[in-house]
Each structure stands twice: as C-alpha cells, then as structure tokens.
Amino acid sequence: MEINFKDEILKLKKERNAIILAHYYQRSDIQDIADAVGDSYYLSKIAKDCKEKVIVFCGVKFMAESAKILSPKKTVLLPVIDAGCPMADMADAEGVEELKKKHPNAKIVCYINSSAEVKAMSDVCCTSSNALKIIRNLEEEEIIFLPDKNLGSYIQEQIPEKKFILWNGFCITHKKVRPEELAKAKNLHPDILIAAHPECEKPVRDAADFIGSTGEIIKFVNKSSNKRFLIATEEGVLHQMKLNDPNKEFYIPGGGMSCINMKKTYLKDVYNCLLNMEYNIELKEELRQKAYNALSNMHKLGG
C-alpha cells in the first residue's frame, strides 16, 4: 500500500513533539506541510523561541547548525544530510584567522550562510534582511565581511564611510542571473517590476526596481499594486507569492533559478527523518558556544 506521506508526517510530528521549519526555497509540498516558512532570520528566531523539543529543518546544513547553536537542548534534524551550501563551503576558519591577523581592528561579520566553524571565528552573524542594520550599529569602521562578496558589496554601497574587506564567495544560483535577461524582460513587458536578492551581482542589482531578502521581496510584491514581476532569486519563493497574490504574474530570469541543494528534500525524506529521528545535528560544545556569540549578537544588533 502506498504511504500518504503528508498524513504520516503530521501524525509523527505530534508523536515526536516536533516543529517543521521550511525555507522559502524548498519545494512547494514541503512548504505546505511546514509549521513555519520563511527566510533564514525568521526561521532562526522560530527555532530559538519554539516550545517543541524536536526541530525538523527543511533547508540546508548551515540552517540546521544555526538552530542547534541557538537551541542546544533541542534535537535538530536535517532530512537530507548532504544538503549543503556551496557559498558556505567557500569560507574556512583558517582563512578568517589570517584576515583577523592582517586587520586586527576590524569586526568580523559573517553571513548566516556559513559553517559553525566560521561563525565561531566571527564577532556577529547576519542575514540579508538585517546585515545593513547590524553593520550600521557597529562602532568599528573596518568590517571583514564573508563569505558573500555580492551581499557585502551591496552593504558597502549603503555605508560608504566604512571600509569593507570582502571574502571572495558567492551563491552559484544567484550568479547565473544576467543583466541582459532583465533587459529582455523589460522590453517584452515595459510595466514589469524587477525584484532582486542582494546575492545577485552588481549589474543585476543596478537593473532592479527593488533589492531585498526573500522575505522582503515577498512583502514588496504583496504591497505593490503592480501586476507583473520578474523575481531574481531562487524560484521556490514563487509558491508563497502565488498563494498571496494569485492574480499577479511572476517570471524568473532565464526561465528558472533552482538551488539543487534546497531541492534535495522530498516529503519522503521528511517522513523518514521523523520516523527514524535522522539526521541529528551535533556540535562540540566549545565550538557551539563560540558560534553562539555571533548568532546572539545578530539578534541583539539586528532587532
């Protein structure tokens, strides 16, 4: 007999006293069974404050790690253990240590898209929705920002009085967007509004009508009276947009932007995850405590 994964997941979730968190980039059916859907910052707050003893994180490894860092007494499960983030893998603790020696007066700000080891080397963590606020709230004029050079350069444009040392990392999905694709969309639909994630490269950001995190892009679309949008971020966000605004039209540059790691999780994986209590995220306590400081500072400075 074929398993009804949705029903079984809901049953197991109650038995395990679990909460299911899903990033906007997850598959539509994963978003539909989640207790909370959001961007990295929103989900990190939910993970920190939730009463459930088990957190099933439908996302990528750095997200589940962040939940464990903030909630060490909770069981944090990642349904697909090899769902990683190439951008997070571009930064390493040794490289951060070297930069620290070269720039002893700089504050190290790491994007939440980073490993626990990199967070442990950082002064404060940030997301794309709160990076600007956090860096404005820092007294230091010199900022080491990693791993995403595109988000870093976008923040640098807003705060020219600060000196930024940028790590040479990037998101492989956002890197695919080409300015000519945006120009083509504008030619076909002169009324279209372009919303881009700050992980996009500068020529793409310059062509956008709005720049923001996934959550901010969804709010922008929802509040706008415009009917047609080109969304320059991972296409998973379209699910929530269509639910909120079924009468609006949405397009993706190049016909599609899909993160292979975010799309690794299927309902079957969430079912197996709850059934077998796999895959459990564990961190050494010394590493967790160091990384906790950066995430704790994010919540203090980011509001």
Image: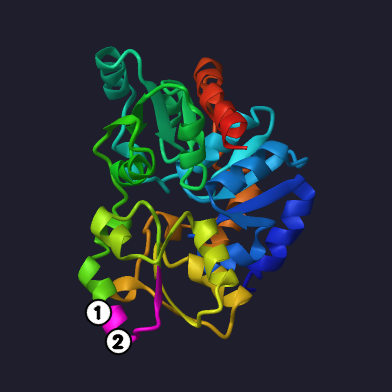
Amino acid on which disc 2 is placed: Leu
Residues shaded magenta: 184-194
Q: Is residue 106 above or below residue 169?
A: above
Neighbour class for label 2 at 10 Å: few (<14), some, many (≥20)?
Answer: few
Residue pictured at 35% horizontal, 14% vertical: 105
* Residue 191 coordinates in the image, percent (x, y): 40, 83
Q: Where, by quadrant of the figure, is residue 177 drawn?
A: bottom left
Is 20 in front, or is 301? 301
Looking at the image, residue 226 lies above or below residue 125 = below
Q: Are marks 1 and 2 in contact (CB under 8 Å)?
A: yes
Q: Residues within 10 Å of mark 1 (few under 14, many from 20)?
A: few
Amino acid carrying mark 1 in the image: Lys
State the residue in front, 136 or 48. 136
Q: Residue 115, how many percent across, how many down?
A: 42, 33
Residue 50, by quadrant, is: top right
Residue occupying image coordinates x 68% and y 59%: 9
Depth check: give the residue in front, 116 or 182: 182
Quadrant where the N terminus sits is bottom right
User: In 3D space, how far apart are the residues under numbered discs 1 and 2 (Cα atoms)?
Assistant: 6 Å
Q: Which mark is residue 208?
A: none
Residue at 32%, 76% in the rendered image: 255
Q: Locate residue 73 relative to residue 208 in the image: left or right.
A: right
Image coordinates of residue 223 in percent, x first then y, are 59, 70
Is residue 110 in sight in this rendering? yes
Q: Which residue in the structure is indicated by mark 2? A: 188
Q: Position of residue 121 (x, y in %)?
A: 41, 21
Callout 1: helix, strand or loop?
helix
Query: For mark 1, what is the residue?
Result: 184
The residue sitting at 31% across, 23% down in the picture is 96
